[in-house]
Amino acid sequence: MIERRPFDSLGGANHGWLDARHHFSFSEYHDPARVHWGALRVWNDDAIEPGTGFAPHPHADMEIITYIREGAISHQDSLGNQGRTEAGDVQVMSAGSGIRHSEYNLEPGVTRLFQIWIFPDQRGGQPSWGTKPFPRGERSGQFVALASGIEEDVDALPIRARARVLGATLKAGETVEYRLEAGHHAYLVPASGQVEINGIALQTRDGAAIKDEHNLRVTAHEDAELVLVDTAR
């Protein structure tokens, strides 16, 4: 089963400094049919104006993955972590028993990102944060684990869930395949480009909610950048 969720069907709001689109219920947007997908709770498509961002605020019991599409984000948190994550790279914050953080766009242009939240397998624990570069060229023609709680994904940023966030880039006409284990849920978004997944056409920033499909075959109709979440529940 693959359910296409067109970009123009997503919830969201434009706050001036933040133009946000929500694949799942978030903040003042609520759709009872789009609350979560397996352990995937949030997928926000955010555009943040220069010199603005999210002021310090708390989180607990959530794995928060930020995929930077354009620009960069600067992070600070109550553990004393500071860092800047730029386009193509990823940061992960395991909120654990509780953490406060801020995320600001200190760049001269708009920062565009995907913010992805995944339920952890267990509540509590020491919070943590990390960031890592993932050059787009190293994802050419293949899915690469960017953040993962699967033991064999040794090069991915760790998360505390039986889930993985993967990225791939495709040239027009190229195809990539991914095997989805029985009982898993997956969600695919083309950050750019037009693709087809198992015969279902997706435009840029559409979502595809996937289950009961054992083999995912994605073909690019034009150069494309893909982000895929695979959760075990």
Image: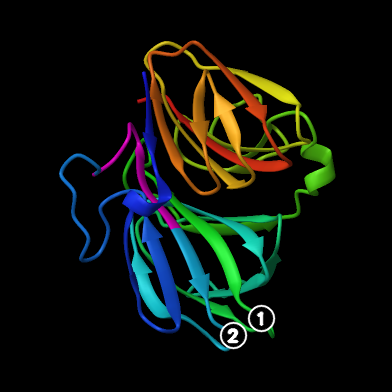
Q: What SS does tag 2 mark?
A: loop
Relative placement, left or right, of 133 versus 213 is: right
- In which quadrant is the C terminus drawn? top left
Q: Decide: few, some or many residues near mark 1? Use Cα within 10 Å; few <14, some 14-19, many ≥20.
A: some
Q: Which residue is mark 2?
A: 50
The answer to which image quadrant residue 222 occupies is top right
Residue 211: image location, x then y, percent: 38, 20
In this view of the protein, can residue 196 be seen by the observer?
yes
Say which element carries label 1: loop
- Alpha carbon separation for disc pair 1 and 2: 5 Å
Identity of the residue drawn at 71% across and 65% down: 86
Residue nearer the viewer, 228 or 74 = 228
**Is 128 one of the magenta-colored residues?**
no
- Camera-side residue: 192 or 102? 192
Q: Is residue 43 magenta?
A: yes
Vertical arrangement, residue 33 with respect to residue 129, above or below: above
Q: Residue at x 38, y 13 (%)?
A: 212
First to last magenta residue range: 35-44
Look at label 1 and name its amino acid: Gly
Q: Amino acid at mark 2?
A: Pro
The answer to which of marks 1 and 2 sits earlier in the sequence is 2
Q: How many marks?
A: 2
Report the residue that reaches farthest toward the right: 137
The residue shown at (64%, 84%) is 106
